[in-house]
Amino acid sequence: RPQPIPSYPTPVLYLQSSSVPSRPVPENRHRTISVTTFVDITRHPHPPRHTQNIMATLSHRLLSAQNANTTDAIIAHFSADPAFLSLSESEGSLILSRDEEDASKLQRGVDIAKSKGVIDPSFVPEEYVVVDVMGKSPDMVVDEILERVRAYQGEGGSGGGVVVLCGLSGTGKVKDIVCSASLRVLLLSLLASGQGTTVAKLREKLENEDKKCVVTWSNGNIFRSVTLLASTWCEQQSYCNGFDPEKALTKENLADFMNMLTFGKCNGKFDTRICGLGLDLLVSEVENTELKAPKVTKNIPAVAELTQGEVILFAADAIQQMGRDGIFVLLEGREQTVNYVRTPLRFTLTLSDLSLIGKRRAAQRLAAVALGMVGPEAGKEEIVKALEAQLAIMVKEHR
């Protein structure tokens, strides 16, 4: 395993090898060897010089940024504070428990799809490449992924392709901690520096550096489309008093609803078409209107649980269509759903130190409230007092 680099006054290169222990590499040899640098400021007992500078300049400007630098400074300042560690543990537990609940609901839907024969219970996806995001910037994570993507392209891969991104805890004790929606939130809090998520950066580099046509796919709009059809069906039945999942979501009705969805090129670009029950809509034109109406939003959970398999297969076909057409598709979600999309470019983003999840969330909360408690002229001492006062309040709330 890479070893933390001590806080030497000058940069030190470390050789990583399975047979040779990590050791300093003479500067005059750096052109002839492969080296890896690793800095893990959350574990090293003596923070590197740049972290100490952040701590020393905890200012209103830094607090106002409300970004990764802000949370880094707060985490570093309270690194040995029992109250902060207690709050972090509570925040982390809440996040993981919510994601565990979401994962359980999703698995029930997948199991239903398997029992109906919609998806193959013995299906085996291609192997995932594990990427530990601990101590890495967004660019480092993206470059690690791009290295494999470009290698695949160089080996004869098509002009298009599908890149699957999902998240796991990396401990074996907690299952998926990142779902399609929370992947953005978690990676933003762990990795971002105000420039977006790993997915956004990956898209940016594929478009700007590799000149690829890139789209990001999420199953959310497909679930919304099925929900719109189910709600419309209920409105057209005289014996339905509002949305009735038992009547609307029968096996036969779900098959009909899925047949009312088609994916292909419309007006020169790929889109999903909803055609049936008097509706004829393109998802790209109604994703922020009809598909976000109350009759859709409030009924999505009931529909999603019973249509996981159907939506998984619909998405897999749509994504493969785009890939064959030369488009690079970025697909994010939980393994249970993204497994069924065939691609060798599969990546699992892990976090080896789960405690950082709670620390980030706690620091984000402290920063947000403290910003409203101090003025633009506040110095470090006043800011620290505001943070400490709010920390005491938050700890009491969690008891």
Image (cartoon, grey):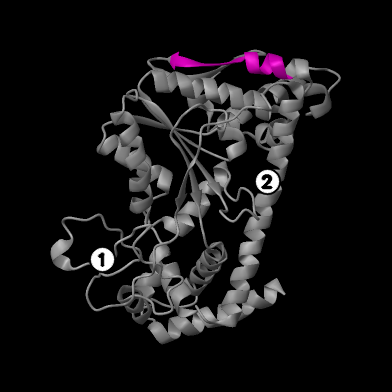
Magenta-drawn segment: 254-265
Using the image as rendered, state which of residue 180 and residue 11 is in the foreground.
11
What residue type is disc 1 on?
A: Leu
- The residue furthest bottom is 381
Percent of width and height locating residue 239: 86, 19
Residue 181: say if magenta. Answer: no
Percent of width and height locating residue 373: 50, 76
Task: Check residue 102 in the rendering and tell me which mark sits there, or answer none.
Answer: 2
Residue 106 appears in which quarter of the rendering? top right
**Total marks drawn?**
2
Quadrant position of the N terminus in the picture: bottom left
Rendered view: 194 above or below 231: below
Residue 255: say if magenta. Answer: yes
- The residue furthest left is 28
User: Could you say whether the residue bearing mark 1 is in a helix, strand or loop?
Assistant: loop
Inter-mark Cα distance, 1 to 2: 43 Å
- The residue furthest right is 239
Q: Which residue is mark 1?
A: 13
The residue under the point 40% across, 18% down is 324
